[in-house]
Amino acid sequence: GLEFRRVLFRSLKIEVGETSEDKKFTLLETRCLGMCAMAPVVKIGNDIYAKVTSDMCKALLEKY
């Protein structure tokens, strides 16, 4: 959970509510995507990724 957040914030160089310099990403937090058993969950556009680890973070971002 927390390590994943740190990797995400460092990779994008932004905090929650901010948009990346290249305008590709805006970080938003939500309480529920209806997938608690699959947490942590990341939604990028219409794509949803479940059980995301800090190791998966950079690879996910590179796809976009």
Image: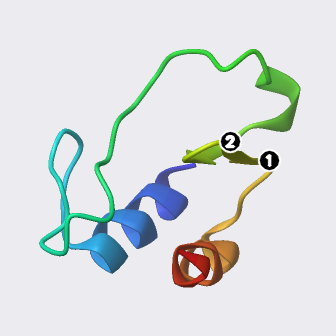
Name the element at disc 2: loop
Amino acid type of the residue tagged 2 in the rendering: Val
**Mark 1 residue type:** Ala
Is residue 55 or residue 25 the one in the foreground? 25
Identify the residue under disc 2.
Answer: 41
Query: Does the CB distance between marks 2 and 1 fall below 8 Å?
Result: yes
Q: Residue at x 54, y 84 (%)?
A: 62
Of all residues shown, which one is farthest toward the right? 37
Rendered position, 64 above or below 52: below
Q: Secondary structure at mark 1?
A: loop
Q: Residues within 10 Å of mark 1 (few under 14, many from 20)?
A: some
Residue 34 lies in quadrant: top right
Q: Position of residue 55 (x, y in %)?
A: 66, 79
**How many other residues sit within 10 Å of disc 2, few (<14), some (14-19) or many (≥20)?**
some
Using residue 8 as the reference point, say whether residue 17 is left or right of it.
left
- 38 relative position to 5: left or right: right
